[in-house]
Amino acid sequence: MAYKLNVNGKVLTADVDPDTPLLWTLRDTLGITGPKFGCGVGQCGACTVHIDGQPVRSCSTPVSAVGEKKVTTIEGVGADPVGRKLQAAWAEFDVAQCGYCQPGQIMSATALLKAKPRPTDADIDAAMSGNICRCATYNRIRAAIKRASGQPVEA
């Protein structure tokens, strides 16, 4: 079945089965490879994208559930001022080690800052708890989120 998807501000057509995960539609059919496959069950966060501004796990979201909603991936998040600030902070704090989880981390952090522009540590913990980083760069992730929110960063 052909689906018209609004991805990063462009309408793209994907001819896939209705139960195809959005992740595979993005990666394999549309060539948008920023969202990563991690666990396949929505637990690790590597595949996080935004659907109408809300972070979702694209590995467990069927393409048929998207409809006409706006999908934003790591490739498009920099068009948003909050996403752009986070990407700059990520670079400043050298957050990425292996980098595999970072697209999902940035997508979750962007949703957090859009909902809570000056999050507390508890807010950050809650919003980021579903994103696993095997390299354990959690302290740098927290620092980058705080910098992007304009809060002081402890040394």
Image (spheres, rainbow, N blue to C red):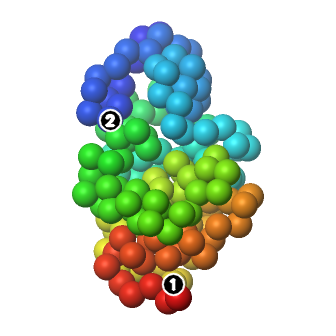
Q: Position of residue 121 (x, y in %)?
A: 51, 84
Which SS class for mark 2?
loop
Count of labels shown? 2
Q: For residue 110, what is the image quadrant?
A: bottom left
Which SS class for mark 1?
helix
Task: Compare residues 118 and 64 and report the one nearer the observer.
Answer: 118
Residue 50 visible in the picture: yes
Are dots 2 and 1 in contact, CB under 8 Å? no
Residue 109 visible in the picture: no
Q: Position of residue 26 (x, y in %)?
A: 50, 27
> At 46% across and 60% down in the image, what residue appears?
91
Task: Compare residues 95 and 2 and report the one nearer the observer.
Answer: 95
Q: Is residue 76 above or below residue 139?
A: above
Q: Amino acid at mark 2?
A: Asn
> At 50% across and 89% down in the image, what residue appears?
154
Q: Position of residue 65 (x, y in %)?
A: 46, 33
Residue that badge 1 annotates: 121
Q: Earlier in the sequence, mark 2 or mark 1?
A: 2
> At 35% across and 47% down in the image, what residue appears?
77
Label 2 crowd (10 A; few <14 / some 14-19 / many >=20): some
Q: Amino acid at mark 1?
A: Asp
> At 44% across and 15% down in the image, what residue appears?
14
Q: Is residue 103 above or below residue 92?
A: above
Residue that badge 2 annotates: 8
In this rendering, would 111 be left or right of 132?
Answer: left
Label 1 crowd (10 A; few <14 / some 14-19 / many >=20): few
Marks 2 and 1, Cα distance to the nearest angstrom?
A: 30 Å
